[in-house]
């Protein structure tokens, strides 16, 4: 059966999960959704859109809201593949149509919710001996009575963060008290956060692809397990933190590692650990894992992103919008179009 694809974007905030809130991205990923849709359209894949002739510069012309009504509209217009370019959670409207057998590009909603909890995911990875930074959980119950067994500076992070939003470096006790108070008072992230040791070394980002058949160098290559795209190094940090890509385009503070750099033992080890982590969370689409080296040069995994940003240089006005994953894909000879087509080819359904 030929594929007729509709892209879903996030139309509403996800629910609180155990008192933890994930802030919504302005636009709900409609920009990257439109990049994906336009890329498929340019490759002669049938793309179902809300209006008959979408304008190349208008994001919402290309994507459907991830509501019950939006999903139904896309399917009534003929979509037989739904691309979940949105934040997923248990009880999401997409669960019903997944159960009915429609093809999906995206994670299982319950898995996305579970592993989007960075604290619980880190605990799980630690159980599997994946190297994770030291950390401590801060809640409304213990924020007047906790201790940390690692030195300042430390990193304060939301439990269900998005990019570097809400992440800050804390240098001493007084700053820590202020940061915790501000995060709780704002109610932006819910009633818990965690502190993590600050790693002083190089930062890299590794995109892990799911098992499947891929076209690489004009050949079909079968990947039996999760596999790494070439790592990307991050630089030009702001106050020790890589800035949010909505503020600074990743092409201005990121570069794919050279062949020589990739062959470094510590880099190779980090790639293997990231592949293990993606297998543990049973990723069905690319996940992006951020790693940073400690003072010994060992890379630790500090952020597993179940929904990496997927913007790309497909539309004429967005030639500077390659995401970290798109940058990485170029190293193996994939254009953004190649990346998107290979992702589509990994679509799955419940038989």
Image: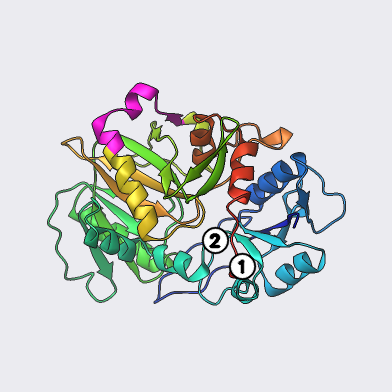
Q: Is residue 64 above or below residue 344?
A: below
Query: In this orientation, does residue 168 appear?
Result: no
Direction from residue 351 to residue 194 in the image, left or right? left
Q: Nearer the viewer, residue 227 or 290?
A: 227
To which residue does mark 2 refer? 24
Where is residue 223? Give x, y as percent: 47, 45
Q: Quadrant of residue 318?
A: top right
Location of the N terminus (image quadrant): bottom right
Q: Secondary structure at mark 2?
A: loop
**Magenta highlight range:** 253-268
Circle nearer the N terminus (1, 2) = 1
- In the rendered image, the residue lying farthest to the right is 52
- In the rendered image, the residue lying farthest to the left is 149
Location of the C terminus (image quadrant): bottom right
To which residue does mark 1 refer? 12
- Asked whether 13 falls inside the magenta stretch, the response is no
Q: Nearer the viewer, residue 349 or 171?
A: 349
Where is residue 118? Give x, y as percent: 35, 61
**Residue at the spot 76% in from the left edge and 39% down from the top edge:** 42
């Amino acid at each position: 059966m030929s594929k007729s694809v509709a892209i879903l974007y996030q139309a509403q905030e996800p629910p609180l999960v155990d008192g933890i809130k994930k802030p919504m991205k302005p636009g709900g990923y409609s920009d990257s959704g439109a990049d994906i849709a336009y890329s498929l359209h340019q490759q002669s894949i049938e793309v179902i859109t809300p209006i008959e002739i979408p304008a190349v510069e208008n994001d919402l012309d290309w994507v459907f809201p991830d509501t019950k009504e939006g999903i139904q509209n896309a399917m009534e217009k003929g979509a037989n593949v739904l691309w979940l370019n949105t934040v997923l959670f248990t009880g999401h409207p997409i669960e019903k149509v997944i159960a009915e057998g429609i093809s999906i590009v995206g994670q299982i909603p319950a898995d996305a919710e579970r592993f989007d909890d960075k604290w619980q995911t880190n605990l799980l990875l630690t159980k599997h001996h994946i190297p994770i930074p030291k950390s401590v959980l801060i809640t409304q119950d213990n924020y007047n009575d906790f201790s940390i067994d690692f030195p300042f500076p430390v990193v304060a992070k939301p439990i269900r963060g998005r990019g570097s939003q809400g992440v800050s470096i804390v240098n001493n006790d007084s700053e820590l008290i202020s940061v915790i108070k501000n995060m709780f008072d704002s109610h932006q992230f819910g009633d818990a956060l965690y502190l993590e040791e600050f790693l002083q070394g190089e930062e890299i980002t590794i995109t892990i692809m799911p098992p499947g058949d891929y076209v690489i160098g004009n050949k079909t290559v079968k990947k039996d397990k999760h596999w790494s795209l070439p790592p990307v190094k991050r630089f030009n940090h702001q106050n020790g933190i890589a800035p949010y890509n909505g503020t600074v385009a990743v092409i201005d503070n990121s570069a794919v590692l050279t062949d020589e750099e990739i062959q470094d033992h510590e880099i190779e080890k980090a790639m293997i650990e990231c592949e293990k982590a993606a297998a543990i969370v049973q990723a069905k689409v690319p996940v992006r894992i951020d790693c940073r080296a400690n003072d010994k040069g060992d890379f630790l995994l500090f952020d597993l992103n179940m929904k990496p940003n997927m913007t790309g240089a497909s539309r004429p006005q967005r030639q500077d919008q390659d995401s970290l994953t798109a940058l990485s894909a170029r190293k193996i000879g994939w254009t953004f179009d190649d990346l998107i087509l290979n992702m589509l080819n990994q679509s799955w359904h419940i038989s």
